[in-house]
Amino acid sequence: MDRIFSGVQPTGNLHLGNYLGAIRNWVRLQKDYDCIFCVVDLHAITVWQEPEVLRANTREVAGGMIAAGIDPKACILFNQSQVSAHAELAWIFNCVARLGWLNRMTQFKEKAGKHRENASSGLYVYPNLMAADILVYKATHVPVGDDQKQHLELCRDIAQKFNNDYKSDFFPLIEPIILGAASRVMSLRDGTKKMSKSDPSEYSRINMTDATDAIAQKIRKAKTDAEPLPGEPAGLDARPEAANLVGIYAALANMTAEDVCKRYAGAMFSKFKEELAELAVAVLAPIGAEMLHLKADEAYVDSILRNGAERARALAGPILREAQDIVGFVRV
């Protein structure tokens, strides 16, 4: 069976964008693939994290994944720092990847901003660790959104260069799985910006642990425009807030944007948002309730992560050792 690897940062406050953009798709993929899902706490510390907050966020994200439908028996779920093979293979890849490749990575430029010289070296070589995350399991596929395509291309470059340098075909060339509707969920207050927990306005996002009243209120207060819904998605091209809400409805209802536009053609957003609020509450409220239940049961979440790490180490260990043999390391 083809193998998928994917990870999510333990940044806390999981929101609708995390759910529709990644986690919901993983739930579907676990039925058809050998899936490995990881809370990437090594990636998280490329920028400063308060230790206690990092621990809490790691458990919260793991709990959110379970609450959303990730089955720890059907797939592997663990936190990255508990499988040292990730870091060990990442060092090999630090010596395979070229500086010119890393200099082209746009995400480092965005995260470092104007203070590039003060950024951690970990943030700079972050893509090499991401490649190690995937290739230490010889994963064949990675679900990606638009903002991760460049990292996947670098992963393929690293695998190909390793294979060429050592005259082997050891690492596979990863294939992307392009995520579907609403893979990029935008702010409820500004349809040109991605939904984010760092936005100062609570009304910009729906948190996965929001109460039902809060979910409905945020949908009702979401920014739109005065025009009715068009009969086809092309009519949303210059209407980012309207397009965002249509995309959210389509994803939550497992419909296409075309179908949503046909159903609500000519309707005003006051009516559409009421029905979207009902749909959002129906889908998200049970997940949020289970997340709160799991948050109160740290021992259970830790047991899932511990078991997942053991299974992950059993897969990654032999692959890492073979890579080390290929490189020429002496194992005694």
Image (spheres, grey):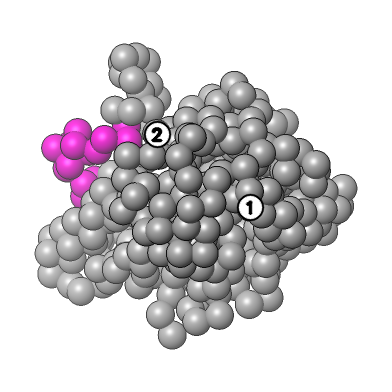
Which amino acid type is marked by label 1?
Leu
**Residue topped by disc 2:** 192
| Residue drawn where x is 68% and y is 75% of the image | 73
User: Could you tell me which quadrant the N terminus lies in?
Assistant: bottom left
Specify which label sits upstream in the sequence, 2 or 1.
2
Is residue 103 on the magenta stretch? yes
Q: Which residues are magenta?
A: 95-108
| Left or right side of 275 for 145 | left
Compared with residue 13, is residue 117 higher up or lower down, i.e. above or below? above
Residue reaching furthest to the front: 266
Tag 2 near tag 1, CB within 8 Å = no
User: Could you tell me which quadrant the C terminus lies in?
Assistant: bottom left
Image coordinates for residue 185, horizontal then vertical, percent: 48, 46
Image coordinates for residue 218, horizontal then vertical, percent: 67, 37
Q: Nearer the viewer, residue 259 or 295?
A: 259
Total label count? 2
Image coordinates for residue 329, horizontal then vertical, percent: 31, 58
Specify whether residue 81 is in view: no
**Residue topped by disc 1:** 276
User: Which numbered circle lies on residue 143?
Assistant: none
Q: Residues within 10 Å of mark 2 (few under 14, many from 20)?
A: some
| Residue drawn where x is 43% and y is 75% of the image | 3
Specify whether residue 98 is in view: yes
* SS for dot 2: loop
* SS for dot 1: helix
| Left or right side of 78 for 4 | left
To which quarter of the image does residue 270 belong?
top right
Is residue 42 on the magenta stretch? no
Which amino acid type is marked by label 2?
Thr
| Residue drawn where x is 34% and y is 14% of the image | 115
